[in-house]
Image (cartoon, rainbow, N blue to C red):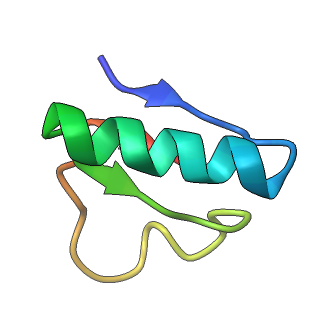
Amino acid sequence: MSEHFKPENTAQLCEAVKWAAGAGQALEIAGTGSKRAIGNVMETDHLL
């Protein structure tokens, strides 16, 4: 099951990216996600 991370500032964003990279976890980085259904579906561990 993937987790959804919603960082409130750049420090939290950096920490989430560092954690994912160190743990070998794939992140999907999305804004509002309005275009997620267009194109190929991404297989990721977490949504940022």
Total number of numbered labels? 0
Q: Quadrant of residue 32?
A: bottom right
- For this orientation, the residue located farthest to the bottom is 39
- Considering the image in quadrants, where does the N terminus appear? top left
Is 13 placed left or right of 7 in the picture?
left
Residue 10 image point, x, y percent:
77, 57
Residue 7, image quadrant? top right
Q: How far across and how far down the image is residue 34, in percent?
A: 66, 70
- Residue at x-position 25% and y-position 48%: 21
Residue drawn at point x = 41 percent, y = 80 percent = 38
As drawn, 20 above or below 32: above
- Above or below, 35 relative to 18: below
Q: Where is residue 39 in the image (x, y as percent from the top left)?
A: 30, 83
Front residue of 26 and 9: 9
x 17%, y 51%: residue? 43
Residue furthest toward the top? 1
- Asked whether, in this view, residue 4 is left or right of residue 1, the answer is right
Position above or below: 12 against 39 = above
**In front here: 29 or 7?**
7
Say which residue appears at 32% left-offset and 40% top-offset. 20
